[in-house]
Image: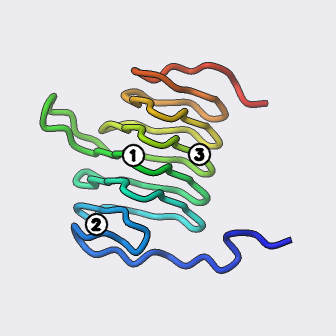
């Protein structure tokens, strides 16, 4: 059985330009990417204050990840822990950590930490259940 990550290679990221998978990073020097990550098309990452995306993380298309917010003056590193999944069209705000193995539902507004091993979604995000 073939694994979709068998031939995975780290993405080439140019400052403020779309990758070959059509996602974009500002402040790329403050972005740490793990192995076997999958980021969907049209996702925007602002890593001004640091964004760490650990191994095997999946981020859906059309997501926004902000380590800085000029509207409410929030700043802080964003951490997406190993094997978490962020549903399409979600927004992850400055200073937030999404826990290991957790799943964020599509169209969620993640404005607070999400623990390990949970399903969470909503505007604002709310933990719905634990993953056994």
Label 1 SS: loop
User: Quarter holding the C terminus?
Assistant: top right
Q: Quadrant of residue 27?
A: bottom left
In this figure, which residue is indicated by the disc labeled 3?
A: 84
Label 2 SS: helix
The span from disc 2 to disc 3 (Cα, nearest Å) is 21 Å
Q: Position of residue 126 (x, y in %)?
A: 51, 19
User: Quarter holding the N terminus?
Assistant: bottom right
Label 3 SS: loop
Q: Quadrant of residue 66?
A: top left
Q: Residue at x 37, y 54 (%)?
A: 43
Q: Residue at x 61, y 43 (%)?
A: 100
Q: Quadrant of residue 102?
A: top right
The span from disc 3 to disc 1 (Cα, nearest Å) is 14 Å
In this figure, which residue is indicated by the disc labeled 2?
A: 28
Residue 63 - label: 1
Q: Position of residue 88 (x, y in %)?
A: 48, 43
């Amino acid at each position: 059985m073939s694994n979709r990550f068998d031939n995975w290679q780290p993405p080439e990221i140019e400052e403020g330009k779309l990758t070959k998978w059509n996602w974009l990073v500002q402040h790329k020097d403050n972005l740490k990417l793990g192995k076997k990550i999958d980021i969907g098309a049209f996702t925007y990452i602002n890593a001004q204050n640091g964004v760490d995306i650990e191994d095997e993380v999946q981020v859906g298309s059309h997501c926004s990840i902000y380590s800085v917010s000029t509207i409410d003056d929030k700043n802080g590193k964003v951490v997406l822990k190993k094997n978490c999944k962020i549903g399409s069209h979600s927004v992850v705000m400055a200073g937030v950590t999404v826990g290991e193995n957790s799943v964020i539902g599509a169209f969620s507004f993640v404005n607070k930490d999400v623990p390990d091993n949970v399903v969470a979604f909503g505007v604002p995000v709310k933990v719905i259940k634990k993953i056994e």
